[in-house]
């Protein structure tokens, strides 16, 4: 849903904690993770947002869906709509965190083949292992999310339309910071790759590399606890080839010291993350770190 700047300003004021305003760019506390510093940036003119900590991004409609509110088409001068939105936001903040477990047959509706997964280079075996699916109604690739115990808690949707934004849609209320994608598969492995995105994780497993994904470029306290719970002997950091990825690698290196290895992307390799590399390049990156 598209809103004008005034409507967006009223909506943000009523639903988020705003810490700084600089023209069209507003800095807020992120509602997608336990934010203490304002890492959530909203452009009130364009009606879009991005969190530079957890990676959440989208439109005002996406934000409204996440916090359980309606993005307003208009806000009247009397302020009644603002008051209603504020009350709904406070109710949402006060609601207890609960994890909804879905039955496995929930995925039956997405058991449709689609060339997207093959074009991404994923083998039929890994597509089946991660239950990668397709929603023909919404034209979305579907990536199931399971918790540490292996219970289904939702799906990540990859929008396949060329101009779709954001590319990835998370379940309503899903908190990225509380999960490590792929953790239920990684528990029995003592050598583990740490990546950013869910498909980076899938790509690593396709190359025979046990992996978990942060679903962003920051390690939360909960994710730190989960890594300690898995307790691998060695971890190879294979984050994206950009500034955020380098910062994530440095943070992990500081936290886990001798148990962490950070390999380099070699000259001539095309791509910014593990999913862009070939199977042999992923394997070489992982093995070269363990050999040090």
Image: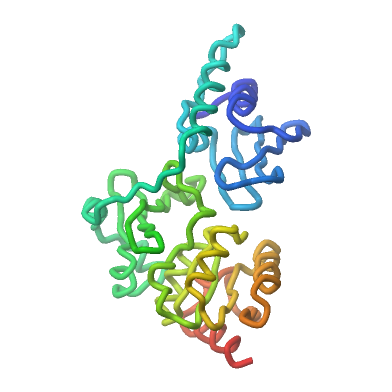
Residue visible at 35% across and 47% down in the picture? 100
Q: Position of residue 283 (x, y in %)?
A: 50, 84
Q: Position of residue 93 (x, y in %)?
A: 53, 34
Q: Position of residue 24 (x, y in %)?
A: 72, 32
- How many numbered badges does the structure rendering display? 0
If the image is split into quadrants, where does the C terminus sit? bottom right
Is residue 268 visible to us here? no
For this orientation, the residue located farthest to the right is 22
> In the rendered image of this protein, does residue 50 appear above or below residue 219?
above
Q: Is residue 234 left or right of residue 124?
A: right
Residue visible at 61% across and 8% down in the picture? 77
Q: Position of residue 286 (x, y in %)?
A: 54, 83
How did the renderer colour the structure?
A: rainbow
Residue visible at 56% across and 16% down in the picture? 83
> In the rendered image of this protein, does residue 53 appear above or below residue 148?
above
Q: Is residue 216 left or right of residue 139?
A: right
Viewer-side residue, 2 vs 258: 258
The answer to which image quadrant residue 189 occupies is bottom left
Viewer-side residue, 67 vs 233: 233
Residue visible at 49% across and 32% down in the picture? 92
For this orientation, the residue located farthest to the bottom is 291
> In the rendered image of this protein, does residue 105 appear above or below residue 268?
above
Q: Is residue 164 left or right of residue 26?
A: left
Is residue 142 visible to us here? yes
């Amino acid at each position: 849903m598209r809103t004008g700047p005034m409507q967006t300003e009223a909506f943000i004021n009523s639903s988020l904690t705003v810490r700084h305003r600089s023209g069209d760019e507003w800095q807020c506390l992120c509602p997608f993770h336990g934010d203490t510093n304002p890492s959530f940036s909203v452009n009130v003119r364009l009606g879009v947002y991005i969190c530079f900590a957890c990676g959440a991004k989208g439109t005002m409609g996406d934000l409204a869906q996440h916090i359980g509110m309606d993005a307003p088409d208009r806000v009247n001068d009397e302020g009644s709509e603002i008051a209603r939105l504020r009350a709904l936001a406070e109710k949402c903040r006060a609601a207890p965190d609960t994890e909804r477990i879905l039955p496995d047959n929930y995925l039956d509706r997405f058991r449709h083949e689609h060339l997207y997964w093959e074009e991404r280079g994923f083998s039929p075996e890994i597509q089946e292992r991660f239950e990668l699916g397709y929603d023909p109604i919404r034209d979305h690739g579907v990536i199931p999310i399971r918790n540490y115990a292996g219970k289904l808690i939702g799906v990540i949707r990859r929008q396949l339309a060329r101009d779709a934004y954001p590319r990835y849609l998370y379940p309503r209320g899903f908190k990225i910071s509380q999960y490590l994608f792929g953790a239920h598969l990684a528990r029995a492995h003592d050598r583990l790759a740490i990546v950013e995105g869910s498909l980076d994780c899938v790509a690593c497993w396709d190359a025979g590399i046990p992996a978990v994904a942060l679903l962003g470029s920051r390690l939360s306290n909960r994710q730190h606890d989960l890594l300690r719970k898995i307790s691998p002997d060695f971890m190879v950091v294979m984050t994206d080839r950009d500034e955020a990825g380098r910062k994530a690698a440095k943070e992990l290196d500081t936290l886990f010291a001798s148990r962490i290895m950070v390999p380099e992307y070699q000259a001539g390799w095309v791509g910014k993350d593990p999913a862009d590399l070939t199977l042999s390049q992923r394997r070489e990156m992982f093995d070269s770190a363990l050999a040090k």
